[in-house]
Image: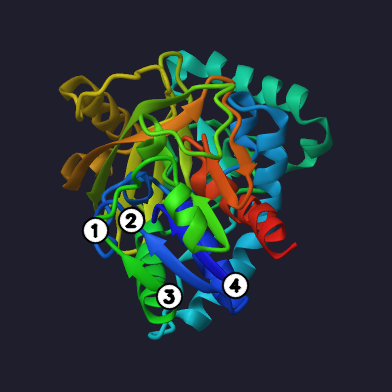
Amino acid sequence: MKVAIVGAGVMGRLAALKLIGAQHRVTLFEAQSFDHPQGAATISAGMISPLSEAVHAPPEVVRLGLQSHNLWPDALSQLRELDPEHHPVFFQQHGTVAISFSEEQDCLLCLYAKMHQLLPEHHSQIRMLYNQEVLNLEPDLERFETAVFLKNEGQICNRQFLAASTRAIRQHAQVIEHWPLEGNGSVLQKQYDWVIDCRGAGAVKASTYAETGAQALHSVRGEAIRVRTKRVHFTRPVRIIQQRFHVYVVPKPDNIFVVGTTDLGDRGTRSVTVRSSLDLLSAIYCLHPGFADAEILEVMGTHRAFYSDNRPKITQNGNIICVNGLSRQGWLLGPALVDDIFKRVTG
């Protein structure tokens, strides 16, 4: 079966790997550089956090996120087999820690209460920690006497995944770079058995034949900072819960940390701002003094696509399938949504 995939973000790569593994002939079309991606998948923290998303997203996102949490190990095992270099991708499922600074402890207590209200079937996965319990879990959180531990969560090294998937897809599929989709996709529809549109923010101003038009697709700016330091030793993602915005600090291999915010309020088209950078850097300095001497590797900004109801959607018209509206949840939802697409394609 001949399948065209448009867009080489998280969804496009996962879909390509799944179909390649099933012996289908895949052609991946990317509007920019395939080997040097610059989109949301590149700057993101790679968090797989279904419980944390419960306070921002509808219940189906939590359900799909938990499904993906279980699917990721098999997806990465298949990627390692397809990768000609067979490199493992850093992946861990050690949970997430949420903290608040002393003057905003009410924010942490509100988060704990809200998550217990929204996730009654997952109470055992959401624990309040005190004093020594916090230090036993993360010794470098010595400034904090309370924390919330979210057990059933994890993260992936997005940069390692992108590198490994680039090698694997180059080896087993055709890649056409610098190819923006023209028109509504009907040209590809005639040339391939299936067309899977995974363009994300690239589809905001260029709708496809598969979209219903019932809801408009919007774009939001996302920002993140990558820093390196040997003075901080977190072993799992840490979320800083504040009144204005929440900050995440995600450890990566080689003493690297990705720092960003879950705030979706700014829908502007500007690049990274001084204010947002100062907000993020001030938060991590208050989190741990070891960040004061951290080396700033990158300050990054890009756009992500979402629907007004914050629900990702898979739409289909004939042999064109469109998946979009994942916003910052591509790593969280990708494997589960690809399973849905795979079932449609293979019948």
> Please, what is the three-letter code of the amino acid marked with disc 3?
Ala
> Please, what is the three-letter code of the amino acid marked with disc 2?
Glu
Q: Are there few (<14), some (14-19), or many (20+) residues within 10 Å of tag 1?
A: few
Q: Position of residue 174 (x, y in %)?
A: 38, 73
Residue at the location (30% across, 55% down)?
A: 256
Q: Earlier in the sequence, mark 4 or mark 2?
A: 4
Residue at the location (63% across, 48% down)?
A: 318
Q: Is residue 121 left or right of residue 45?
A: right
Q: Which mark is residue 173?
A: 3
> Please, what is the three-letter code of the amino acid marked with disc 4?
Met
- The vertical placement of 338 against 313, above or below, is below
Q: Position of residue 332 (x, y in %)?
A: 56, 47
* Residue on which the image places disc 2: 30
Task: Indicate the quadrant where residue 342 lies.
Answer: bottom right
Camera-near label (1 vs 4) is: 4
> Please, what is the three-letter code of the amino acid marked with disc 1?
Ser
Q: Earlier in the sequence, mark 3 or mark 2?
A: 2
Residues under labels 2 and 1: Cα distance? Answer: 7 Å
Camera-near label (4 vs 2) is: 4
Disc 2 and disc 1 in contact, CB within 8 angstroms: yes
Residue at the location (61% across, 48% down)?
A: 153
* Residue on which the image places disc 1: 33
Disc 4 and disc 2 in contact, CB within 8 angstroms: no
Residues under labels 1 and 4: Cα distance? Answer: 26 Å
Q: Are there few (<14), some (14-19), or many (20+) residues within 10 Å of tag 3?
A: some
Residue at the location (56% across, 51% down)?
A: 334
